[in-house]
Amino acid sequence: MAKLQVELVAADRRVWSGEASLVVARTVTGDIGIMPNHQPVLSVLETGPVTIRTTGETGEGTVVAAVHGGFLSYADGRLSLLAEIAELADEIDVERAERALEQAKADADASAERRAHIRLAAVAAGTR
């Protein structure tokens, strides 16, 4: 079975690296699914969840991350997700994200509200 080599990198660190059978991400032109042997693509990432269907030595699973801006690049079996900010679902402090959401609503900051919603959605998706 063909596999993707995936790197999810934030501005400050490598967030996740490994093999996958499918990656779904939100781009400026809509959601995109990348599987092995996909056509080469370069796109701008929107704030949204990234879902990675993992394969490899530890078996199949799912990794979910909240990604805030960046770029997606796929060519020759390698997918790079270069994000401004990226957090794995299991790293997100739910109480802090809920406080950030309430503060964003109080400040009428639509951008901060969207980021908080995405973080909470990533946690919810990661626990399924």
Image (tube, rainbow, N blue to C red):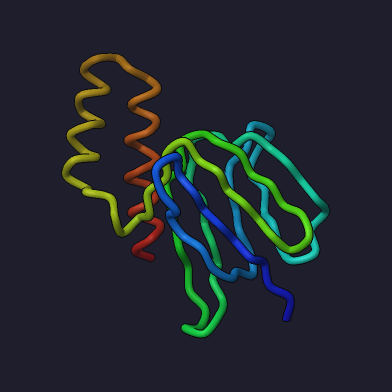
Report the residue at 74% width, 66% height from top: 36
Q: Is residue 71 above or below residue 102?
A: below
Expressed as whole percent of the image width and height from the top left, the position of residue 13 reads: 41, 49
Which quadrant: the N terminus? Answer: bottom right
Expressed as whole percent of the image width and height from the top left, the position of residue 39 reads: 83, 53
Which quadrant: the C terminus? Answer: bottom left
Report the residue at 31% width, 59% height from top: 90
> Which of 69 and 115 lies nearest the eye of the viewer?
69
Q: Is residue 100 above or below residue 60?
A: above
Residue pushed farthest front? 12
Q: How many marks?
A: 0
Report the residue at 20% width, 28% height from top: 102
Expressed as whole percent of the image width and height from the top left, the position of residue 55 reads: 56, 76
> Which of 2 and 76 lies nearest the eye of the viewer?
76
Report the residue at 67% width, 48% height from top: 32
Expressed as whole percent of the image width and height from the top left, the position of residue 22 reads: 63, 64
Quarter residue 10 falls in: top left
Q: Is residue 71 above or below residue 4?
A: above
> Which of 126 and 76 lies nearest the eye of the viewer?
76
Quarter residue 6 falls in: bottom right
Q: Is residue 116 left or right of residue 73?
A: left
Residue pushed farthest top? 108
Q: Is residue 56 left or right of residue 32?
A: left
